[in-house]
């Protein structure tokens, strides 16, 4: 992903509300499945890491990105933004700028 594409996705993410929360259980198989399902439907998702979670946002984002084959757009404090392009072209909602 280029810096231009990342900046474009950050702009979209600014207007997006978090749809998932990560609590003290941190990254569970259920959470991974929920993130995967959300990425299938939306391509770009925002996640909130709650205060009772002992892991830091950056490490959680890396684990979730690896398990869901997505990319970390940004991690700011307790907010994580992940992106994964839809496999089918007709389901794509976000058109990334070229290179």
Image (cartoon, rainbow, N blue to C red):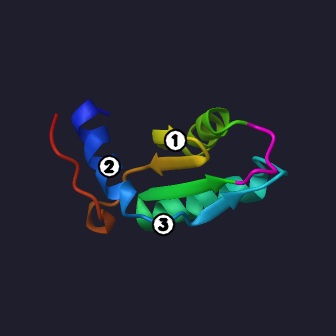
Q: Do the residues labelled 2 and 3 touch (CB within 8 Å)?
A: no
Residue at image position (28%, 59%) is: 94
Q: Name the residue under label 3.
A: 17
Up the image or down, 49 lies above or below 76; here it is below
Residue at image position (34%, 60%) is: 88
Q: Mark 2 points at which residue?
A: 9
Whether residue 87 is visible here, answered yes or no, is no
Distance from Cα at disc 1 to Cα at disc 2:
14 Å
Residue toward you, 51 or 65: 51
Residue 99 in the image, given as x and y percentages of width and height: 16, 33
Tell me the crowding category of disc 3: few under 14, some 14 to 19, or many 20 or more residues within 10 angstroms, Cα based: few
Whether residue 33 is visible here, answered yes or no, is yes
| Dominant SS in magenta | loop
Distance from Cα at disc 3 to Cα at disc 1:
14 Å
Magenta extent? 50-55
At mark 1, the secondary structure is strand
Residue 89 in the image, given as x and y percentages of width and height: 27, 60
At mark 2, the secondary structure is helix
Tell me the quarter of the image containing the N terminus. top left
Q: Mark 1 points at which residue?
A: 76
Residue at image position (49%, 44%) is: 70
Residue 39 in the image, given as x and y percentages of width and height: 49, 59
């Amino acid at each position: 992903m280029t810096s231009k594409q990342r900046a474009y996705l950050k702009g979209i993410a600014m207007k997006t509300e978090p749809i998932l929360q990560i609590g003290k259980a941190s990254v569970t198989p259920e959470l991974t499945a929920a993130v995967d399902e959300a990425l299938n439907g939306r391509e770009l998702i925002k996640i909130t890491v709650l205060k009772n979670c002992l892991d830091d946002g950056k490490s959680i984002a890396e684990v979730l990105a690896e398990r869901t084959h997505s990319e970390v757009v940004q991690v700011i404090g307790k907010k994580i933004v992940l992106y994964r392009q839809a496999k089918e072209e007709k389901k794509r909602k976000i058109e990334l700028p070229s290179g």
